[in-house]
Image (cartoon, helix red, strand yellow):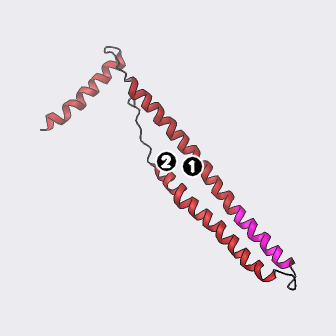
Amino acid sequence: MACHSTFPHSFLFFFQILQNLGKADKTTDEIFEEHLQNFNLQQLNANRLHKDVSNYIRCVRAMQSASKSLMETVGETYEPQWVGHDLLFVQAQNQEMLWADLAHKLSDQVLIPLTTYTVSEVDLNPER
């Protein structure tokens, strides 16, 4: 039983040695090479997308902080006797909730699955 499982591995190893010595013809599978090239390009694009989405989420969180700071300043500046003063606090809370929700959804629905995909990279190069 052990002979059956080791024979293909030893044959492939022997054939690779012959290829490296130039004694056997190297076979190339053009379709495989094309798929490999497409896969590598997809991985490269996924890594770039991951980097850009991470940066975008950082910017969304910075905008959330800037929006909160702005609304606090407007709240301090807005006179209590002015029309709409009572709605200002509610609007500030609503804006902060929307920014937080956007950052949370981007992280959960985009960044985490993208991270899972990019971490699960597979080495498909047959020459290694």
Residue topped by disc 2: 118
Disc 2 crowd rating (10 Å Cα; few below 14, some 14-19, many 20+) is some
Q: Circle 1 sits on which residue?
A: 50
**Does 24 sit left or right of 92 as displayed?**
left
The vertical placement of 65 against 55, above or below, is: below
Taking depth in this image into account, of 34 and 98 the one nearest to the observer is 98
**Which x, y percent locates residue 65?**
72, 67
Q: Residue at x 58, y 59 (%)?
A: 106
17 w.r.t. 92: above or below: above
| Mark positioned earlier in the residue sequence (1 or 2) | 1
Task: Label 1: state its secondary structure.
Answer: helix
Regarding mark 2 in the picture, which secondary structure is present there? helix
* Label 1 to label 2: alpha-carbon separation: 8 Å
At x 49%, y 54%, the residue is 113
Q: Position of residue 4 (x, y in %)?
A: 15, 34
Question: Which quarter of the image is occupied by the N terminus?
Answer: top left
Residue 80 lies in what quarter of the image?
bottom right
Q: In front here: 109 or 16?
A: 109
Q: Do tag 1 and tag 2 residues touch (Cβ < 8 Å)?
A: yes
State the quadrant of the C terminus: top left
Q: What residue type is disc 2 on?
A: Thr
The x, y position of residue 24, in whole percent, is: 31, 15
Circle 1 packing at 10 Å, graded few (<14), some (14-19), many (20+), is many
Left or right: 3, with 13 as reference point: left
Residues shaded magenta:
62-76
